[in-house]
Amino acid sequence: MINVAVIGASGRMGKLLISNILRSEETRLSAAFDLVNIGSDAGEVAQLGVLDVPISSVDDMESVLRSSETDVLIDFTIADATIVNAPRAASCGAGLVIGTTGLSADQKAMIEDSILKNNVAGIISPNYAVGVNVFFRILKEAARYLGDADIEIIEAHHNQKKDAPSGTALRAADVISEVLGGKDYVHGRQGLAPRGSEIGIHAVRGGDIVGDHTVLFAGDGERIEIKHQAHSRQAFAGGAVKAAIWIANAKPGFYTMDDILGL
């Protein structure tokens, strides 16, 4: 049985992660962390029944991870918290599944460095949905044949999402740019904005949209649109728990969803 801990256990994503951990025959919830509901049973907070796993303060992370013999920590919180907590977890020998978005390149490098220095396995991904990672693969193939088209990326999320554009939109742009030898990005347009060879990236925030991503390849007389829509956060939570199982059985190192899905 793989011992999995969740940070941000009281939040919407944290509760869903706990639910998926319980549903899997390969995992058990070993620890839960948050800034609120300290001491409360994580199962009761998630409305899943008593699990005898109290929500611990992040200040006690090292001692709790060691005493619970946690194999993997899943973190879907915020960048400022993740860059502090991920290295702490790695120092305890816990593998990492990081779904936090809004991390800068330097912050990602810091986390990757902590994974390698502590000889654990880990992954940082903007999106753990299996369909999204197939979406990235399709974009890579499309870019090989449609590099002369005007390329625009439109993403839409709920009105509580803090970072923009989404990590998934940026990863989509990077996938395409890598195929085409490097492209500039333009984030939205206003006033006089003649189009060049850039990739346009546009963010929409409203209501309870879980996550929509559309990539438009527009040419003369035709266009192709490639789209992924998340109907619920279950797509992300289920993929993250699959990643945790894979990371728990992997050799030390830094991995991607391509590794986990065999793409």
Image: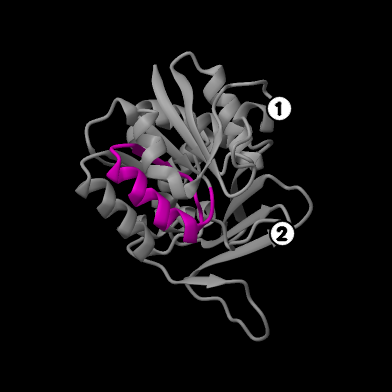
Q: Residues within 10 Å of mark 1 (few under 14, many from 20)?
A: few
At x 71%, y 59%, the residue is 205
In this orientation, does residue 126 appear?
Answer: no
**Which amino acid type is shown beneath numbered disc 2?**
Arg
In which quadrant of the rendered view does residue 97 lie?
top left
Image coordinates for residue 9, horizontal then vertical, percent: 58, 39
- Which residue is under mark 1? 47
Where are the magenta residues, as a range? 77-101
- As drawn, is 206 to the left or to the right of 203? right
Question: Looking at the picture, how far across and down is residue 87, in whole percent?
Answer: 33, 51
**Residue 191 screen position, x and y as percent:** 68, 85
Q: Is residue 126 depicted above or below 74 in this figure?
A: below
Query: In this view of the protein, which residue sits in the foreground, 68 or 132?
Result: 68
* Quadrant that contains the C terminus: top left
Q: Secondary structure at mark 2?
A: strand
Residue 184 forms part of the magenta stretch = no
Residue designated by label 2: 205
For residue 188, above or below residue 256: below
Mark nearer the viewer, 1 or 2: 1
Identified by mark 1, the residue type is Gln
